[in-house]
Image (cartoon, rainbow, N blue to C red):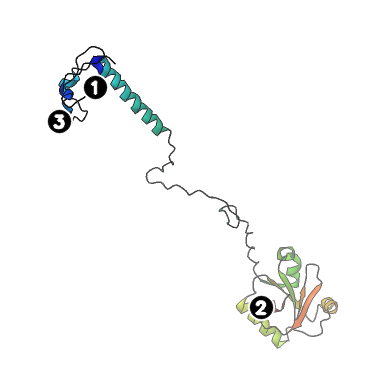
Amino acid sequence: MPDGDRAPRTSQDAGEMLPSSDGTRGLWRDRAAVGWTGVMTPSEENQIPSGRIALGRRAVVAALTLLALTACGTTTAPQAPQGATMAPAVTASSGTPVPGNSSTPPSDAAAPAGAYLSRAEYTQLAASRAGTKVVYFFHATWCPTCRATEEAIARDGVPAGLTLVKVDFDSENDLRKKYGVTTQHTFVQVDASGAELAKWTGSKGGAEILAKTV
């Protein structure tokens, strides 16, 4: 190492002029006396060649550019616009229903409204009453209990899902024979083909009639 580039060996040497390797004058550094922190005054900067200052500035710019590029490469979560709420992510898992993809079947449609029809009316509307429970009510005008049941039906209505068909006990001999009806105030439940499903007597209102059906 040339004599001009050697570091000071003692505290006394620290206060001497330190010539640089390119022949320019060095800076006064009384490190032992003032504890130099590495921050130069403007007068000290003037003693450094402009080439070295430019080189140092380029190094600082390069370091800042590298730091900025590193920050840009960091992935951040998207932010919702002010006043907006981001919907949470939906994750499907076994045993957990996903909104909009439920395996629960839709509930059954409401049962059709109940109806009390004559036999002639039922013959015309049979197709529209499909899916209801059809019950023939063998009624006689001279039967007190038949009249009481009809009054209860008129007052309380017919329960949903029930089609009650009024059959004249005195004139509908073919139906009486088909279902073996021997007394008035008899009820016979039939399927869509007219086959007998159940038979009973004495019901006093729509709810009681429906409760007897199968």
Of labels 2 and 3, earlier in sequence is 3
Q: Residue furthest front?
A: 9
For label 2, the crowd category at 10 Å Cα-Cα, with few meaning under 14, some 14 to 19 and many 20 or more, is many
Looking at the picture, does residue 61 appear above or below residue 101?
Answer: above
* Quadrant housing residue 212: bottom right
Alpha carbon separation for disc pair 1 and 2: 117 Å
Total marks shown come to 3
Disc 3 designates what residue?
A: 34
Alpha carbon separation for disc pair 2 and 3: 112 Å
For label 1, the crowd category at 10 Å Cα-Cα, with few meaning under 14, some 14 to 19 and many 20 or more, is few
Residue at image position (18%, 24%) is 14
Q: Residue furthest top?
A: 23
Q: Residue furthest bottom?
A: 144
Image coords of residue 107 (percent x, y) = 62, 62
- Choose between 186 and 46: the one closer to the eye: 46
Residue 41 visible to the viewer:
no
Image coords of residue 108 (percent x, y) = 64, 63
* Quadrant housing residue 171: bottom right
Residue 39: give its label.
Answer: none
* Quadrant housing residue 205: bottom right
Residue 206: give its label.
Answer: 2
